[in-house]
Image (cartoon, rainbow, N blue to C red):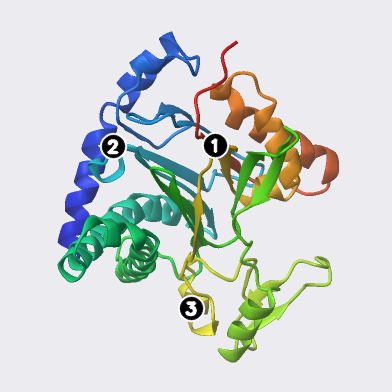
Amino acid sequence: MRQISSLLQGLARSLSVGRDRDRDRDRKGNGAGDRKTAVPAVLRTSGTLWGDGSDTFAAVCSRRGEKGINQDCSIVWEGFGCQEGTIFCGIFDGHGQWGHYVAKAVRDSLPPSLLCHWQEALALASLIDDGEKKLGDCQFDLWKRSYVAACAAVDDELRRSRRLDAVQSGCTALSIVKQGDLMIVANVGDSRAVLGTTSGDGTIVAVQLTVDLKPNLPQEKERIRRCNGQVYCLADEPGVHRVWQPSRESPGLAMSRAFGDYCVKDCGVISAPEVTQRRIGSSDQFVILATDGVWDVLSNDEAVHIVAGTPDRAKAAKRLVECAVRAWRRKRRDIAVDDCSAICLFFHPPPPP
């Protein structure tokens, strides 16, 4: 597994070599309509990326908060698995002393691990099932099994790493794979995916695609308590439920699922993803993937209208993050601004001017 993962990570690195060159070329024609400058690439920073062989367009932005180093990171991999019309987007939010390192490690390991498990599952399914139609019918099951296996493998590899201390540090992970009109959504933690879709009367509406996996959710709390973990709020943080070790005042984890955080893995905190699917229709316009720093201060509707109301799609993620930062300073003056990061993936070409 490690050898295959390393091989695929090498492929990702080789694709990303041209990223800066491609982004420089994109700046010469930074409007979303200038498709000819875009080539397949991996984007690991703030910026934009066209989907080759499809109409998708991704805008990414990350802004450091007031708590120190930015522990958020992201990846957009166009042509995922060398498949035309397939794109992987992931956003990762670290926490703890070494959370920024954990987030980057998961960002770099999860996509190739997912690809490896998906290729294995696809090969096995093709041996069992006869015909492309049957394989098409079980696409979601293949991706779901692959995501579950990949997350387990990445978390296990992280645990065994001698270069990274993830005992009391970890990260969340929210990602999507869009393959044609099928979008797979996998969530570990409290980042959120929200769809912007057009209603029957022509207005843009928000559809939340993920559940914020926090310790106060009944099924999450039950699992944690079954494993002798504790869930409660501190007196100075009413309403903020955290995970604690039994008889110890640590670590106070604000999410119920994460990579790393091995001090509470025996207390019910897991890295298993919640995996769902969505068939993208003509009314679905874009999806937003954002860390909790955005959703703590902006509602789903606010975020969707900010993105939809940005004339230049290349600036959509930046404008969303800037609005979140301003909302933090307006609504939570006594609390340090959190890191805020977002990916906006548009499904269709922009309307003609």
User: Tag 3, which secondary structure?
Assistant: helix
Q: Position of residue 156 (x, y in %)?
A: 33, 71
Residue under circle 2?
A: 84
Front in this rendered view, residue 187 or 284: 284
At label 3, the amino acid type is: Lys
Please give the name of the residue rendered at 50% of the width and 77% of the height, measured from the top-left corner. Answer: 263
Q: Quadrant of residue 13?
A: top left
Q: Is residue 342 visible?
A: no
Please give the name of the residue rendered at 47% of the width and 66% of the height, measured from the top-left corner. Answer: 273
Residue under circle 3?
A: 265
Q: Is residue 284 above or below residue 296?
A: above
Residue under circle 1?
A: 282
- How far apart marks 1 and 3 lie (CA) works out to 42 Å
Asked if the residues shown at circle 1 and circle 3 are in contact, with their CB atoms under 8 angstroms apart, the answer is no
Q: Position of residue 137 (x, y in %)?
A: 35, 61
Please give the name of the residue rendered at 59% of the width and 39% of the height, measured from the top-left corner. Answer: 64
Q: Nearer the viewer, mark 1 or mark 3?
A: 1
Q: Choose the circle earlier in sequence order: 3 or 2.
A: 2
Please give the name of the residue rendered at 57% of the width and 19% of the height, measured from the top-left corner. Answer: 351
Horizontal placement of 247 versus 128: left or right? right
At label 2, the amino acid type is: Glu
Q: Is residue 109 above or below residue 249?
A: above
